[in-house]
Amino acid sequence: MRATSILKEADMTAENQKPEFAIEAVGLEKTYRASGKLPAKQALKGIDLKIRRGSIFGLLGPNGAGKSTFINILSGLVTKTGGTAHIWGKDIDAQPRAARSAIGVVPQEITMDPFFTPFESMELQAGFYGVPKSERRTDEILAAVGLADKRDAYVRQLSGGMKRRLMVAKALVHTPPVLILDEPTAGVDVELRRSLWEYVVELNKAGTTIILTTHYLEEAQELCDEIGIINHGQVIACEPTATLLKRLDHKTLVIQPTETVTTIPPSLAEFDTKLRPDGSLAITFRASETGFGRVMETVRSEGISIADLATEEPDLEDVFVSMTSDS
Ligand code: ADP
Ligand code: MG
């Protein structure tokens, strides 16, 4: 009896010690000094971000926005020039080791020693993080990312996708509560992308906070419960995915008519309809107000027969447009 209640107490203390935010950045700045061909650059201009524990957070922004700089400051690869950051409640300046042991980072670039096997590579990484031999989960993690059968192959014999999976595995050796993936699908095929996402979602369900950067809105909206948008080193939005998507309540239906259409039929003018140079009709409508069915009915009632049909979803570009038109 006593033992269990003590255990419960201990558990509760551990629970209480879990921070509300996995990552907390306040006024984070980075100015790169000019070096070689690169000019000096203020990559981060005061980033404020709070990433809730337990979420799958998407850091979304175009190339050059500062996503990797932000991630690399957290991982210790880049030295910030201003502001503060806490990882799992630990200040990266005051408690750098504790802060860094709370994250596993999968960097944007694949870097790997070609002369080690995945097993050796994992063991080295575990040693680097000071994980005792008895607590290592090398085979378990390799199996989880689908590399059990490549355990003893040389890294140079692995495909790009396998290398990417090994990078994920290596980021997990110390069982960090926060996993950060920097552009994880760059140069990754559809199959791997799907299995990677499945695994990431599984980790999240088991309690790991996930942070990923991407420049694809579609990827972020599919996976993340919260999205922060960064542009030119500044956060321009940070909100639940559903809230963000409400701002983007439009879809475009692109119809290739069987017979050439030269003018936009009046009944279609009720929507925002354009005749494109390739002869297709692009009909933009508010998805929540006007159903897809009503648009199709209108098209049919005009006697337009359809050779081909596609829909276009809003992308990152549209988010920026809607942000600027809001203010
Ligand atoms: P993202 O990951 O969003 O594509 P980065 O954080 O890699 O953006 O880069 C942000 C800006 O900082 C870019 O303009 C980039 O050219 C610049 N930058 C990145 N690394 C360096 C560096 N080592 N020296 C100088 N400028 C850099
Ligand atoms: Mg990057």
Image (cartoon, rainbow, N blue to C red):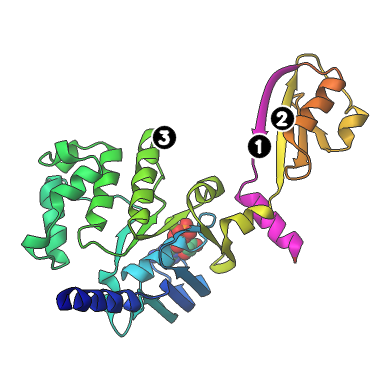
Q: Which residues are magenta?
A: 306-326
Residue 40 visible in image: no
The CA distance from mark 2 to mark 1 is 7 Å
Q: Is residue 70 above or below residue 93?
A: above
Numbered badge on residue 254? 2
- Residue extending furthest bottom? 94
The alpha-carbon separation of the residues under discs 3 and 1 comes to 20 Å
- Residue 182 in picture, x, y percent from top left: 39, 55
Q: Position of residue 108 (x, y in %)?
A: 36, 53
Q: Quadrant of the C terminus?
A: bottom right
**181 to 238, vertically: above or below:** above
Instruction: Confirm or deny contact between disc 2 and disc 1 (CB under 8 A).
Output: yes
Residue 67 is left or right of residue 96, and the answer is right
- Amino acid residing under circle 2: Val
Judged from the image, the secondary structure of the residue bearing numbered disc 2 is strand
Badge 1 is on which residue? 312
Q: Earlier in the sequence, mark 2 or mark 1?
A: 2
Give the residue displayed 54% in from the left and 50% down from the top. 221
Identified at 11% across, 56% down, the residue is 123
Q: Amino acid at mark 1?
A: Glu
Residue furthest to the left in view is: 133
Q: Where is mark 3, residue-wise?
A: 190
Residue name at image x 16 percent, y 40 percent: 148
Image spot of residue 87 (x, y percent): 36, 74
Circles 3 and 1, Cβ within 8 Å, touching? The answer is: no
Which residue is drawn at the image coordinates 26% and 74% (left, top)? 11
